[in-house]
Image: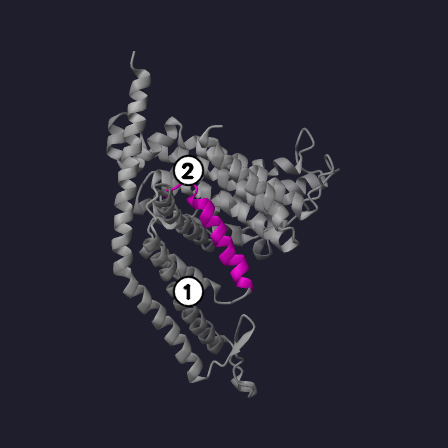
Amino acid sequence: MKRSLLPWLCFALALLVAPLVFPQSAALSLLSQMGTMVLLCLSYNMLLGEGGMLSFGHAVYSGLGAFGAIHLMNGIADGSAPLPFSFPITLVPLAGGLVGALCGVVFGFLTTRRAGTTFSMITLGLVELVSACVLMFPDLFGGEGGISANRVVGEPVLGISYGPQIQVYYLIAVWLLACTAAIYALRHTPLGRILNAVRDNPERAAFIGYDPQRVRYLALILSAFFAGVSGGLSAINFEIVSAEYVGSLRSGAILLFTFIGGAAYFYGPIIGGVVGVLFASLLSAYTQAWQFYLGAFFILIVMCVPGGLARLIDNLARVLRAGALNTRLARLLAAQAAAGLVALAGVVLATEMAYQLSLGSLADSGAGVAPAVLFGIAFDVHSPLTWSAAAALAAAGIAAIVRLRPSWSSSWSLAWKKMEAAEHVRREAASSCRIDREAP
């Protein structure tokens, strides 16, 4: 078995086993949201990571694709869809992708005529324009209430009606696996390679005969197609599409999640989509301040790990593979992780108490402010002792991190040099073997 196939088998196995490990209905819904968001982040990274195009309006293509998919679902239900054959729900995401690609043809012709900051500003204006138009045409987009549909249409095929959430999840998983493989294959085509060249040096790409604007245009159309597929899957999953699907908030979320995962790595958006949905769905069930934590986490990633979580994982994997992770480095890593958890506990406690003070005031009724509850423990938000404990935890954790940082930096530098030396020896050995095979 080729080593290149192993990650794909692991990915497919994870998609297959995930609902068996988490069979609860809430978990299945969360996994379905992760699948659609991962595909959306992967499509966005075709612009950002591969083409260097920072777009603030990628939700336009997924949202309009979702509207196209849900109109098709309603047309299939009432028989008004002008189709020559019975269109199965399984192929509805394909229709969403075609709508997204069509929107990419129209909007991309304008947005890709410029690059850099100008491109970003045009996409920002585009998302605001489309958001306004969605609310201006309620007959087509349903206004603020959106458009709903029923995904259980027609007779079940092989017992699959898409009524149970488990069936919807596996539909999303199949489309996600197929689209991920297609996006990966596109990276290694001549278009993908020249897109990297346009990202790195558009002048040289133009010098060898390629039009940078045309390359960016084709990349945006393909990216819009996969975003539309994600929108169609979301329409099937939630059975409703509203104006929020094309809004700037959703576009910003896609950007944040992709950056958190790591735009420089192919699997970075996969990590970012999973982590982002966990923040937005799971963490929001426990605290109303989840957006604060998401923003703080994003700032921390940009400042400390600019390459995203994928860069962190890749660096650790390379050090482990080279055998450069010694006992001292492991202890320093564990100590820094423990110090970080202590600092995090203090920050979370202070944040929750401050949030409770700002939103939970019941002074008018004379009942006072309700205590902040964390892990079943009530903390008095007016007690100086509680605030002192939060400050002490945060200060102790930060002080420990600062104190450990010099030792960690020196140990990590030594491990990194050892890893580079091991990789150099491995490359030299591989080069020698190749020369020996090619020798007559």
- Residue depicted at x 31% and y 37%: 199
In the picture shown, does residue 302 fall above or below 359?
above
Decide which of 110, 35 is in the foreground and name it.
Answer: 35
Q: Earlier in the sequence, mark 2 or mark 1?
A: 2
275 within the magenta span: yes
Decide which of 265, 211 is in the foreground and name it.
Answer: 265
The residue furthest bottom is 366
Q: How many marks?
A: 2
Residue 366 position within the rendered picture, expressed as x and y whole percent measured from the top left: 55, 88
**Secondary-structure class at tag 2:** helix
**Secondary-structure class at tag 1:** helix
Quarter of the image for residue 212 reads: top left
Say which mark, if any, is on residue 79: none
- Residue depicted at x 46% and y 28%: 2
60 within the magenta span: no
Decide which of 412, 310 is in the foreground and name it.
Answer: 412
Position of 279 with respect to 219 (left or right) is right
Q: Is residue 203 visible?
A: yes
- Residue depicted at x 45% and y 31%: 3
Disc 2 crowd rating (10 Å Cα; few below 14, some 14-19, many 20+) is: many
Q: Amino acid at mark 1?
A: Leu
Residue 409 position within the rendered picture, expressed as x and y whole percent measured from the top left: 27, 55
Position of 145 with respect to 269 (left or right) is right
In the image, the segment drawn in magenta is 264-285
Residue 56 position within the rendered picture, expressed as x and y whole percent measured from the top left: 40, 49
Per the image, the residue denoted by label 2 is: 220
- Residue depicted at x 62% and y 44%: 169
Say which mark, if any, is on residue 341: 1
Disc 1 crowd rating (10 Å Cα; few below 14, some 14-19, many 20+) is: some
Q: Amino acid at mark 2?
A: Leu
Decide which of 138, 58 is in the foreground and name it.
Answer: 58
